[in-house]
Amino acid sequence: MAENKSALQQIRSELDSLSAQGLRRRLRTVTGPQRSETTLDSQPTTILCSNNYLGLADDLRLQALAVEAIREYGCSSGASRLISGTMSLHRQLEKELAAFKGTEGALVYNCGYMANLGVLATVVGDGDAVYSDALNHASIVDGCRLSRAVVNIYRHGDVQHLADLLAAGSAYRRRLIVTDSVFSMDGDLAPLPEIVALAQKYDALLLVDDAHATGVLGDHGRGSGSHFSLPASAIDLLMGTLGKALGSYGAFVAGRQEYLDYLTNKSRPFIYTTALPPAVLGASLAAVRVLQNEPGLVAELRKKILYTRSRLRDLGFTVPDDPTPIIPIIVGDAGRTMELSEKFLAAGIFIQGIRPPTVEAGKSRLRVTITRDLSWSRIDEILAVFASFRDLFPPVAER
Ligand code: PMP
């Protein structure tokens, strides 16, 4: 019986059971620079699953400002933000992010995971209610749990369900709707204009996770609000990340200064951790400036996304018509997904298989992502590999 086993034995048998179900995960090591053409476990490989959408991770301008920041300010912030860790670089980045998003202010967090935890656990609590899309990111799920608010999960993208839940619960002190704008494993968009209207109708706060929209959607990659032509004031708390399209690391919350002051005073994942170091801030600043000055990068990414999606469709893959770089190719079974991932790897293309618990059982998938630094000729070669593997994918009916 499990209770009589030592902790180590229990852990071993849990790992064995993960292996038996095809769900055991292992780390793969990128041994070259972080770009689409690199080396993985020392083999030349094309990465087709990273979030480095604009290919900025090894951009020389980001490198230069990161190095300059180290030279000028050193390697560490040395303390948390409210002690002595706030450096002029944090303030500068916050100022430029607010200008980029068109909001009163922005507050830098150490990463998106912490920002989501930090906002949710601060803005709502006992006696409050959260309304969260069923496919929201794990950091939102964890933030909801940590908040101790009543959590209402609405069916994915279903605004009618959200409206029904909001209509049914008016007794709460405060209410907050939270959604990814681009869903990280499906690449589809939340119906933001309708959600904004519901937030206004029911006087609920709105938190939008723009992790996969920042640098990708909207004018100059300003994000989902711009994509849907919403005024910046429509989203109370906008969370964006700097470690995906922006090629650096970290995250921010943009919105009214009073909300940001509240977070500065009360948000534990903001307060109780060492502030981001100069190199990271330098790279982030450079990335925001690249977006401001070079909208052509976002346009090039978009062309490559549209092209790849439509060619995959021509090859008979079921590919939804979303404007995002995340293309889920649903396989179904976890083991089969990993076999296909291995097949692509043997052909020099790394597409990580996504399995439960990240996605629902029976919905395992290859999560293909398009990055701007893939050359057009390489995209065509990759599509040829998809064509040659077409029959290895289960027919649609089986998925
Ligand atoms: N939100 C979403 C939708 C994400 O996909 C991720 C990262 N995978 C995060 C938040 C967390 O961001 P970070 O990686 O900066 O912690």
Image (cartoon, grey):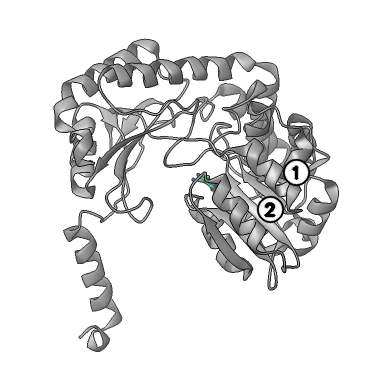
* CB of mark 2 near ligand 1 (< 8 Å): no
Q: Residues within 10 Å of mark 2 (few under 14, many from 20)?
A: many
Q: Dividing the picture into quarters, in which one does residue 166 lie?
A: bottom right
Residue 8 horizontal side relative to residue 309, left or right:
left
Q: Nearer the viewer, residue 71 or 199?
A: 199
Q: Upstream in the sequence, badge 1 or badge 2?
A: 1
Residue 151, above or below 349 = below
> Residue 90's mark?
1
- Circle 1 SS class: helix
Q: Dividing the picture into quarters, in which one does residue 37 lie?
A: top left
Q: Residue furthest left?
A: 391
Picture residue at 26% right of the left edge, 77% below the top: 10
Q: Residues within 10 Å of mark 1 (few under 14, many from 20)?
A: many
Q: Dividing the picture into quarters, in which one does residue 342 lie?
A: top left
Picture residue at 55% right of the left edge, 39% below the top: 190
Residue 375 horizontal/vertical position (percent): 40, 14
**Kind of residue at badge 1:** His
Residues tagged 1 and 2 counted as in contact (Cβ below 8 A)? yes
> Residue 184's mark?
none
The N terminus: image quadrant: bottom left
Residue 95 horizontal/vertical position (percent): 80, 37
Measure the C-alpha gap from mark 1 to mark 2.
9 Å
Question: What residue is disc 2 on?
Answer: 275
The C terminus: image quadrant: top left
Residue 168 horizontal/vertical position (percent): 64, 62
- Circle 2 SS class: loop
Q: Residue furthest bottom?
A: 4
Q: Is residue 199 visible?
A: yes
